[in-house]
Image (cartoon, rainbow, N blue to C red):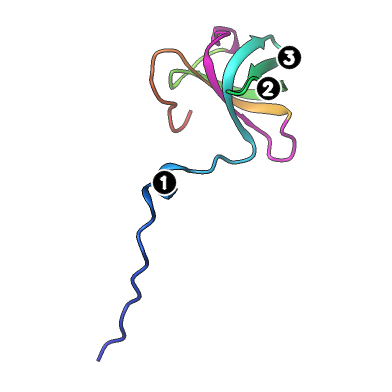
Amino acid sequence: MTPEKKITPAKSVKEVVQKKRPANVFVGTLTSINENGLVMTNKVGKKKSLTLSKNLKSSCDGTPCETKELKTGGKVRVTTQKSDTNIAMVVASLDKNLRFARSI
């Protein structure tokens, strides 16, 4: 006889749909941006100021773009350093696409 395999219960739809965002990823609306930093607002209106890394990578609708091409008022996802959540390493902006690109 072969040992029986344990069958694990399927995850609920809610567990599958809700993926926890890492602590160093922020999503919101871009309020202002300049060569040194940016300010964004989350969905409840809380503002977050971030310093831009010298090695910043930015994208507009999934394609690489210059920081000056990012539009205020647009939706952004900002990934910061894990060790310092006030330094932006990656800024992904949405203007036309409905969803954020998986990678830059």
86 up-or-down from 22: above or below: above
Mark 3: amino acid: Asn
Q: Amino acid at mark 1?
A: Lys
Q: Which residue is mark 1?
A: 14
Which is more toward the observer, 13 or 87?
13
Q: Residue at x 45, y 13 (%)?
A: 95
**CB of mark 3 within 8 Å of CB of mark 1?**
no
- Element at badge 3? loop
Q: Quadrant of the N terminus?
A: bottom left
Q: CA distance from mark 2 to mark 3?
A: 20 Å
The residue labelled by disc 2 is: 46
* Spatial separation of the CA atoms under disc 1 and disc 2: 26 Å
Q: Residues within 10 Å of mark 2 (few under 14, many from 20)?
A: few
State the extent of the magenta-drawn residues as a range. 67-85
Callout 2 touching callout 3 (CB < 8 Å):
no
What residue lies at 59% left-to-right and 13% top-to-bottom?
67
Q: Mark 2 belongs to which amino acid?
A: Lys
- Determine whether 11 is above or below 79 in the image: below
> N-terminal of the two: label 1 or label 2?
1
**Magenta stretch: includes residue 76:** yes
Which residue has dot 3 on it? 36
Q: Position of residue 99 (x, y in %)?
A: 41, 25
- Disc 2 element: loop
Q: Secondary structure at mark 1?
A: helix
Q: Is residue 61 magenta?
A: no
Q: Name which residue lies at 35% across and 59% down.
A: 10
| Tag of residue 40 | none
Horizontal and vertical percent position of residue 33: 66, 10
Residue 56: image x %, image y %?
A: 63, 23
